Image (cartoon, helix red, strand yellow):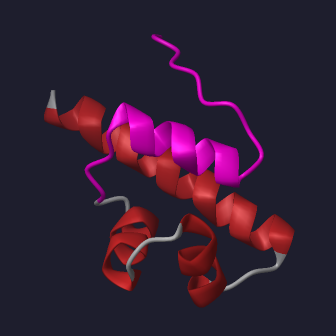
Amino acid sequence: MIAAMRALQESVSSAVATYMAKEKIGFNELTRRLDTSSRQTSRLLKGEANLTMASIAELAAVMGKKARVVFE
């Protein structure tokens, strides 16, 4: 289960990094857009954030995407 959680965290982190590059924004702007603390943004980018389904949906909305779960 720990490996599955880590894979999800890394997937979210990668999506956020891609968003930042595409939008040409830095850490502070991402923090502002997410309306969160710098600590939470840092954990998100490191793949260490413990995200709820609601926070994933909010993150997707900020990035202009829809969140979905795919079981492989």
Residue 21 screen position, x and y as percent: 77, 71
- Residue at x 41% of width, y 63% of height: 44
- Residue at x 62% of width, y 43% of height: 60
Depth check: give the residue in front, 42 or 7. 42
Q: Is residue 30 above or below residue 70?
A: below
Depth check: give the residue in front, 19 or 59. 59
Q: For this view, does 12 lie left or right of residue 42?
A: right
Depth check: give the residue in front, 5 or 23. 23
Depth check: give the residue in front, 36 or 24. 36
The residue segment tinted magenta is 49-72
Residue 67 screen position, x and y as percent: 60, 30
Q: For this view, does 59 lie left or right of residue 50?
A: right
Q: Is residue 64 above or below residue 41?
A: above
Q: Quadrant of the N terminus?
A: top left
Q: For this view, does 23 lie left or right of residue 5?
A: right
Asked if the stretch drawn in magenta spans residue 65, the answer is: yes
Q: Is residue 43 above or below residue 7?
A: below
- Residue at x 33% of width, y 46% of height: 51
- Residue at x 67% of width, y 44% of height: 61
Residue 35 screen position, x and y as percent: 51, 70
Asked if the stretch drawn in magenta spans residue 22, the answer is: no
Which quarter of the picture shows residue 55? top left
Residue at the extreme left of the image, as rendered = 2
Q: How many marks?
A: 0
Residue at the extreme top of the image, as rendered = 72
Residue at the extreme front of the image, as rendered = 35
Residue 64 screen position, x and y as percent: 77, 46
